[in-house]
């Protein structure tokens, strides 16, 4: 089952805007929003959930104030600064708790409970372009990598059940655990970058990461006309690293107009944006067909 | 005073704002780039780097000769980073969170502290401003341990010198962002007036609300979308310390921080004094509670 992932390194380069357009052009892909921390694709695709589940992962310690004797062993052994003193007792800060169970193990009063909280909610939904698999981590939560892996598995199941030929995923920014969980085993990583020093710097890092996981990369240069010198540097980088640049998309506030209207840029009629994205998509289709045949 | 510059959405202008605030800051300052996955502050402030140090996470290293196969390590580990096959402990360092639990429960000394490379920490200065930056190793999944490492170094400087500090945080509302803003006295949320900006601002506000720190907003690229971000701030009582208008000249400028300061200096100054006011109010509030 071919999987295409849209990532960036730097935030705000246009991943979600591009993915929404690709979802429309793909016409029958399983669409996945793997940015489980701050998902935005649903604001364009308006998914209607058909099935929803709680996401539980990892554990959290909680000190029973009545049983706590105030010895402070928990605070001594915690490596995450999650145990705070409160008057003559101790309390676990849920935002800092890593769920390692060390304080639970060493508490002499057996005063620490260890539970598996709800960390988020995930859905399989319908959109006007096809099925969508997505989730929302509750604010401040971790275990995003695990949730991403669950979503990918769900997407593969949906694709198999319904005969979809492709999984198209909107990724998270950065290079950390949600991106790594999205990237492993993907057929093509489409990197959306922008012509700025930060855009270029983060392009290098995300390309390095994709290379680390042996995932082929294609580049879309978005907001391509905001800085000619930076554009030239990005193109030079791509050339020297033999990265295909499959589209250059101009800066156009019509993208925001589309967002405000809950439309893709194609639905919005923003042709300056739609045309290069169509060209990019036909390249992506060709590349994934070839990769999958190989 | 430590100020964290955060956002929900990526690409709203945190790093550019952090650099602009740093250059306009009236008092001695330290800045830390805690967006360790994609650090960019150094590209704008162009610091001289004095030291680069490896950051490591302590993870167990097995000595199979001493293992008696009791399995206490594997029973405790919540992250499946250690498994015992007979009397052979197999460690998976990539999965380890560095809690030290297995090392503490092993009765035979078959586990000793090893390490996993997290990345590196650069220290230097940009003019009079002390500069720190964490850079995550490519392939390292967890950013919070590196973030905490850089924070320790930042806090040492702040305690020793009494400087204020600005933290350039990662985007988002999950554990990297929450870890990064931990030591801050004030959290500044940078947003843009678009539906994605609004949605992610809400998530960030919820994520940081439990930290009990005063929060304020700066709206960047003002004018490009609609008024819903403004409305949200008004309804929730989030003070808006400033709005920077959408200005393509800044992206086009060879020195964006200079351009921002030159074209919108008064707005930057207003944000600096807004942060100070917010901090003073919160200190006064705490003193009132304790009085």
Image (cartoon, coloured by chain):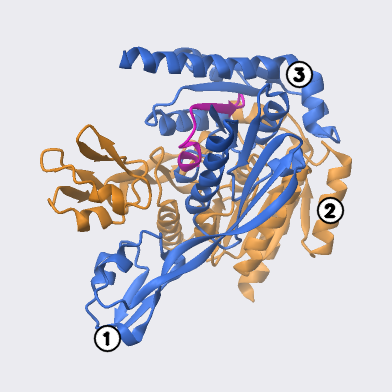
Give, as a single range, the part of the protein colored magenta: B177-194
Q: How far apart are marks 3 and 2 (CA)?
A: 31 Å
Residue linked to disc 1 = B86
Residue linked to disc 2 = A235
Judging from the image, mark 2 belongs to the subunit labelled A
Say which of marks 1 and 2 sits in front: 1
Residue linked to disc 3 = B264
Q: Position of residue B209 (x, y in %)?
A: 40, 28
Q: Distance between the residues labelled 3 and 1?
A: 67 Å
Q: Distance between the residues labelled 1 and 2?
A: 55 Å
Judging from the image, mark 3 belongs to the subunit labelled B
Question: Dot 2 lies on which element?
Answer: helix
Q: In the picture provided, is B33 more to the left or to the right than B50?
A: left
Chain rendered blue: B
Q: Position of residue B133 (x, y in %)?
A: 63, 47
Which residue is drawn at the image coordinates 18% and 53% (left, top)?
A107
- Taking depth in this image into account, of A119 and A291 the one nearest to the observer is A119
Question: Dot 3 lies on which element?
Answer: helix
What is the quadrant of the C terminus of chain A in the image? bottom right
Q: Chain A rendered in what hue?
A: orange
Residue A150, quarter of picture = bottom left
């Amino acid at each position: 089952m071919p999987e295409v992932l849209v990532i960036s390194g730097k935030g705000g380069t246009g991943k979600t805007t591009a993915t929404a357009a690709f979802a429309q052009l793909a016409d029958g892909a399983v669409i996945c929003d793997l940015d489980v921390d701050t998902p935005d694709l649903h604001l364009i695709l308006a998914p209607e959930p058909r099935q929803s589940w709680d996401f539980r992962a990892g554990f959290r310690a909680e000190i029973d104030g009545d049983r706590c004797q105030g010895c402070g062993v928990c605070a001594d052994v915690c490596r995450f600064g999650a145990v705070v003193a409160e008057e003559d007792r101790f309390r676990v800060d849920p935002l800092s708790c890593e769920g390692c169970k060390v304080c639970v193990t060493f508490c002499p009063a057996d005063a620490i409970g260890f539970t598996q909280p709800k960390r988020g909610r995930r859905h399989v939904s319908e959109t006007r372009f096809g099925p969508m698999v997505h989730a929302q981590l509750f604010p401040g939560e971790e275990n995003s990598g695990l949730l991403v892996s669950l979503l990918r598995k769900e997407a593969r199941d949906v694709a198999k059940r319904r005969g979809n030929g492709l999984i198209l995923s909107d990724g998270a920014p950065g290079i950390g655990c949600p991106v790594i969980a999205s990237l492993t085993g993907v057929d093509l990583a489409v990197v959306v970058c922008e012509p700025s020093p930060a855009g270029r710097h983060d392009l290098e890092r995300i390309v390095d990461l994709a290379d680390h996981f042996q995932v082929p990369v294609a580049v879309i240069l978005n907001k391509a006309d905001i800085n000619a010198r930076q554009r030239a540097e990005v193109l030079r980088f791509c050339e020297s690293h033999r990265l295909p640049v499959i589209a250059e998309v101009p800066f156009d506030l019509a993208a925001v107009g589309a967002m405000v209207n809950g439309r893709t840029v194609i639905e919005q009629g923003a042709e300056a944006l739609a045309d290069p994205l169509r060209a990019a998509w036909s390249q992506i289709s060709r590349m994934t067909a070839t990769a999958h045949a190989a | 005073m430590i100020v964290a510059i955060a956002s929900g959405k990526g690409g709203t202008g945190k790093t550019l704002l952090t650099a602009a605030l740093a250059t306009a800051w009236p008092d001695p300052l330290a800045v830390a780039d805690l967006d360790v996955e994609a650090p960019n502050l150094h590209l704008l402030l162009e610091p001289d780097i004095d030291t680069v140090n490896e950051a490591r996470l302590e993870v167990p290293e097995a000595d199979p000769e001493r293992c008696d196969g009791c399995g206490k390590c594997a029973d405790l580990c919540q992250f499946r980073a250690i498994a015992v096959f007979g009397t052979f402990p197999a460690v998976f360092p990539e999965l380890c969170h560095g809690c030290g639990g297995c090392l503490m429960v092993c009765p035979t000394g078959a586990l000793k502290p090893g390490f996993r490379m997290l990345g590196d920490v650069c220290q230097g200065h940009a003019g009079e401003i002390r500069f720190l930056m964490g850079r995550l190793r490519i392939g390292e999944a967890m950013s919070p341990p590196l973030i905490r490492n850089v924070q320790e170094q930042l806090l040492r400087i702040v305690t020793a010198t009494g400087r204020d500090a600005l933290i350039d945080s990662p985007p988002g509302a999950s554990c990297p962002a929450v870890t990064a803003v931990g030591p801050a006295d004030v959290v500044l949320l940078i947003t843009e007036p678009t539906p994605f900006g609004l949605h992610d601002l809400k998530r960030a506000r919820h994520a940081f609300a439990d930290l009990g720190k005063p929060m304020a907003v700066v709206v960047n690229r003002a004018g490009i979308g609609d008024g819903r971000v403004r409305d949200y701030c008004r309804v929730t009582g989030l003070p808006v310390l400033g709005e920077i208008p959408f200005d393509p000249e800044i992206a086009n400028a060879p020195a964006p921080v200079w351009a921002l300061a030159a074209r919108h200096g008064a707005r930057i100054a207003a944000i600096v004094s807004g942060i100070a006011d917010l901090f003073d109010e919160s200190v006064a509030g705490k003193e009132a509670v304790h009085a």
